[in-house]
Amino acid sequence: MSDAKKLFIKTYGCQMNVYDSERMAETLGAKGYVATDRPEEADMVLLNTCHIREKASEKLYSDLGRLRKLKAAGRE
């Protein structure tokens, strides 16, 4: 299964967000994606949050900055 693409999902916020992330993982799993715990290994990164909780939004923007650096490093 080395041809499988890797998927990283990070979930912020409430239990409903966790449920939604699980559904996304199942749907993308049917398309051949396998989960990874390491975003640097992932072919696709999904950050699932809502803007209802301010803390979740702050964490999201912080993670986006880190992911941008990972993506840039992958181009070198």
Image (spheres, grey):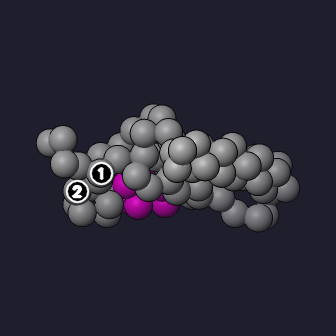
Q: Is residue 19 visible?
A: no
Report the quarter where the N terminus lies.
top left
**In the drawing, does residue 54 fall left or right of residue 69?**
right
Q: Residue furthest left?
A: 1
Instruction: Point out the tag, 2 or 1, that comes first from the N-terminus.
Output: 1
Q: For the residue marked with disc 2, what is the amino acid?
A: Gly
Q: Secondary structure at mark 1?
A: strand
How packed mark 2 is, by other alpha carbons closer than 10 Å (few <14, some 14-19, many 20 or more), is some
Q: Which residue corresponds to mark 1?
A: 5
Image position of 52 with respect to 63: above or below:
below
**In terms of image quadrants, where is residue 66?**
top right
Callout in the foreground (2, 1): 1
Residue 22, numbered label: none
Highlighted magenta segment, given as a residue range: 20-25
Q: Residue at x 58, y 42 (%)?
A: 73
Q: Residue at x 69, y 63 (%)?
A: 50
How packed mark 1 is, by other alpha carbons closer than 10 Å (few <14, some 14-19, many 20 or more), is some
Between 3 and 59, the one lying in front of the other is 3
Q: Residue at x 41, y 61 (%)?
A: 24
Q: For the residue marked with disc 1, what is the amino acid?
A: Lys
Q: Position of residue 38 (x, y in %)?
A: 48, 35
Q: Which residue corresponds to mark 2?
A: 32
Whether residue 61 appears in magenta in the rendering, the answer is no
Q: Position of residue 57 (x, y in %)?
A: 78, 56
